[in-house]
C-alpha cells in the first residue's frame, strides 16, 4: 500500500493506540470501514451533518491521494472504498511501530515486550515462541 511505502509522518495515540490519521480523517475512515463504501453525502450523513460537504470532500480526496482509499466515478462525484479492512490497517500500523522501534533501538523493543507478554494469552505466547523458533532455524 502506497501509504505504508512512503511511511507515516507522525503517529498520534488515540484511545491508547497509534493512528496516522487526523481526528476527522479517523472519523471518515471509521464510517467507510463500517459501511464498506460511501459517497461524500453518505459520509456527511453518517457523521450527522456535523461537517460541511466541502470539508468531507476534501478529507476523502486527501485519503484517496494518500493511497488509503480507491474511488469510482458516480454521477457528478465519487464513491470511495477503503483499500484494506480496519483490522488489516491496524495490523500494518502495529507492524510499522514495532519495526521502527526494533530498527532504532532493539533493546527498547525487548523491554517493551517484557511488559506486554504478561498480558498475552497462552495461545499468543505459543505463537510468539513459534515465530522466534522459526527465525532461529532460518539462521
Image (cartoon, rainbow, N blue to C red):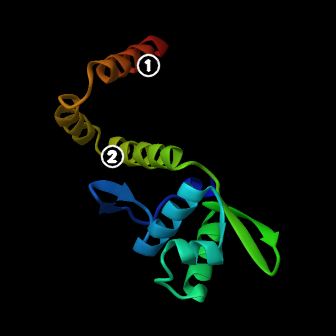
Please say if 90 is above or below 51: above
Residue at the farthest top position:
137
Where residue 39 appears, as percent x and y from the top left, is: 67, 71
Q: Who is closer to the viewer here, 139 or 108?
A: 108
Instruction: Tell me the crowding category of disc 2: few under 14, some 14 to 19, or many 20 or more residues within 10 angstroms, Cα based.
Output: some
Please say if 83 is above or below 62: above
Q: Quadrant of the C terminus?
A: top left
Q: Residue at x 33, y 19 (%)?
A: 123
Q: Who is closer to the viewer here, 138 or 51?
A: 51
Please say if 128 is above or below 65: above
Q: Residue at x 24, y 34 (%)?
A: 113
Q: Are marks 2 and 1 in contact (CB under 8 Å)?
A: no
Please say if 131 is above or below 40: above
Q: In which quadrant of the rendered view does residue 44 lie?
A: bottom right
Where residue 55 appears, as percent x and y from the top left, is: 55, 85
- 35 to the left or right of 47: right
Residue 135 image label: 1
Label 1: element kind:
helix
Q: Residue at x 49, y 61 (%)?
A: 30
Q: Who is closer to the viewer here, 34 or 123?
A: 34
Where residue 90 appears, as percent x and y from the top left, is: 45, 48
Residue 101 image label: 2
Where residue 79 appears, as percent x and y from the top left, is: 72, 68
User: In the rendered structure, which disc, 2 or 1, sits on the residue that comes first in sequence?
Assistant: 2
Label 2: element kind:
helix
- For the residues marked 2 and 1, what is the alpha-carbon distance in whole angstroms? 19 Å
Amino acid at each position: 500500500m502506497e501509504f505504508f511505502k512512503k511511511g507515516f509522518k507522525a503517529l498520534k495515540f488515540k484511545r491508547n493506540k497509534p493512528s496516522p490519521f487526523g481526528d476527522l480523517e479517523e472519523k471518515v475512515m471509521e464510517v467507510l470501514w463500517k459501511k464498506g463504501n460511501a459517497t461524500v453525502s453518505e459520509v456527511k450523513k453518517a457523521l450527522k451533518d456535523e461537517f460541511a460537504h466541502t470539508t468531507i470532500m476534501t478529507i476523502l480526496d486527501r485519503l484517496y491521494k494518500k493511497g488509503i482509499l480507491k474511488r469510482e466515478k458516480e454521477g457528478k462525484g465519487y464513491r470511495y472504498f477503503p483499500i484494506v479492512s480496519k483490522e488489516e490497517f491496524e495490523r500494518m500500523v502495529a507492524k510499522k511501530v514495532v519495526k521502527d522501534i526494533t530498527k532504532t533501538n532493539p533493546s527498547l523493543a525487548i523491554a517493551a515486550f517484557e511488559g506486554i507478554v504478561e498480558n498475552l494469552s497462552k495461545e499468543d505466547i505459543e505463537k510468539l515462541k513459534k515465530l522466534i523458533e522459526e527465525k532461529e532455524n532460518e539462521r
